[in-house]
């Protein structure tokens, strides 16, 4: 004989909440059906996809496409007004002022010396950060690809910083590196040393900006390289060992050539991200001391929102967009080459 249904009072709260949510969802779907069925009969089932894409395209147009078009227009106009009708057309004058230098080896001879300082700082940062992050990611991926105890735990540990917001990362490291109350200086003093203004000296600030960036993003590229390593067939290493290849020979003649397309993707992705660095460095150092850690995106922010040089900021952003577009083309070409090689 079937058991009688449980009374409402004997049912668990989770069951009651689930039933309520199902009832609410059924009501919403019923209302949607009443509205959408006549619309589908009017425009046809094939055109309903455009109806559902319309809200997303509207948001994209307002917050992405329109600002891009306005930025392009601002790059060829001047003035401090943000309204397009109050900005006179000046042609390529902003680009000429931005890129003109008497001696390109000395940014002090440039018309817009802050831009060239930021460009030089960005170049140094990109070379140092990208080369470090690619090398360490490769070493870490090789280590995590081995049969070691706690491998899953260490993979999670290395990837965890990627999940943090860049602002959170900067705040944590800023607390660690403070001159007076920082944890690092506390350790140095405990060991008999003297406290150091890590973020108030140009050279040390640049080094720490690179270290923090590598710590925050290395896990992402390690994961990509680890996936590339795991896609290499194990039979190749077995055949190499049968031919007398040692660990270095296997890495040089098997691992490195087959991993090269993945490494190229990692290189281009890290380049694109490094060129656009802003929020993490802005919170950590504010671009200082002086202009030691001011990079291209911060120059654009400073020109637009602090100096009201909207035309100069737009011109700089278009130059940056050209660089990013070039890097993206390289990435696409590298991806196609990798697929062809595979």
Image: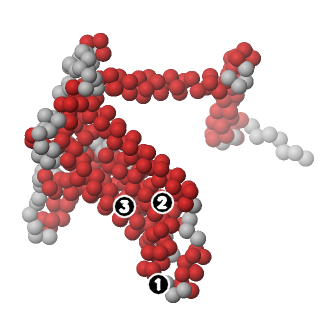
Q: Quadrant of residue 97?
A: top left
- The secondary element bearing badge 3 is classed as helix
Residue in view at x 32 percent, y 22 percent: 73
Q: Which mark is first along the chain, 1 or 3?
A: 3
Between 338 and 155, the one nearer to me in the picture: 338
The percent coordinates of residue 45 (x first, y second) are: 73, 24
**Where is mark 2, residue-wise?**
261
Using the image, determine if residue 287 lies above or below residue 89.
Answer: below
Q: Give the CA separation, mark 3 to mark 1.
A: 24 Å
* Mark 3 closeness class: few <14, some 14–19, many ≥20 residues within 10 Å: many
Between 337 and 149, the one nearer to me in the picture: 337
**In the rendered image, is residue 209 in sight?**
no
**Where is mark 1, residue-wise?**
246
The percent coordinates of residue 9 (x first, y second) are: 69, 37
Residue in view at x 14 percent, y 38 percent: 101
Residue farthest to the front?
102
The percent coordinates of residue 208 (x first, y second) are: 22, 56
Q: Are marks 1 and 2 in contact (CB under 8 Å)?
A: no
**Where is mark 3, residue-wise?**
134
**In the rendered image, is residue 96 in sight?**
yes
Instruction: Classify residue 62 as left or right of residue 44.
Output: left
């Amino acid at each position: 004989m079937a058991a009688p249904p449980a009374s409402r009072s004997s049912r668990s709260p989770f069951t009651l909440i689930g039933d309520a949510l199902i009832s609410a969802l059924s009501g919403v779907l019923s209302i949607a059906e009443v509205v959408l069925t006549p619309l589908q009969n009017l425009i046809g089932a094939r055109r309903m996809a455009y109806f559902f894409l319309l809200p997303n395209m509207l948001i994209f147009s307002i917050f992405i496409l329109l600002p891009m078009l306005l930025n392009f227009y601002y790059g060829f106009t001047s003035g401090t007004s943000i309204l397009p009708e109050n900005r006179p057309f000046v042609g390529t004058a902003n680009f000429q002022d931005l890129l003109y230098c008497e001696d390109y080896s000395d940014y002090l001879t440039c018309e817009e010396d802050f831009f060239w300082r930021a460009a030089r700082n960005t170049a140094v940062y990109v070379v140092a950060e990208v080369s470090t992050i690619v090398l360490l990611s490769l070493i870490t991926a090789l280590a995590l690809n081995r049969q070691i105890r706690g491998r899953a735990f260490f993979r999670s540990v290395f990837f965890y910083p990627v999940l943090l917001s860049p602002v959170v990362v900067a705040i944590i490291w800023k607390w660690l590196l403070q001159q007076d109350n920082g944890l690092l200086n506390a350790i140095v003093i405990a060991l008999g040393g003297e406290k150091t203004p890590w973020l108030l000296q140009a050279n040390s600030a640049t080094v720490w900006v690179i270290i923090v960036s590598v710590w925050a993003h290395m896990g992402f590229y390690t994961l990509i390289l680890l996936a590339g390593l795991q896609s290499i067939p194990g039979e190749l290493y077995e055949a190499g060992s049968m031919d007398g290849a040692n660990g270095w020979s296997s890495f040089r003649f098997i691992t490195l050539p087959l991993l090269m397309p993945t490494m190229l993707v990692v290189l281009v992705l890290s380049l694109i991200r490094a060129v656009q660095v802003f929020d993490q460095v802005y919170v950590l150092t504010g671009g200082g001391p002086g202009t030691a850690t001011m990079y291209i995106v911060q120059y654009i922010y400073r020109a637009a929102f602090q100096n009201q040089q909207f035309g100069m900021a737009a011109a700089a952003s278009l130059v940056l967009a050209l660089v990013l577009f070039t890097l993206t083309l390289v990435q696409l070409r590298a991806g196609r080459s990798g697929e062809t090689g595979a």
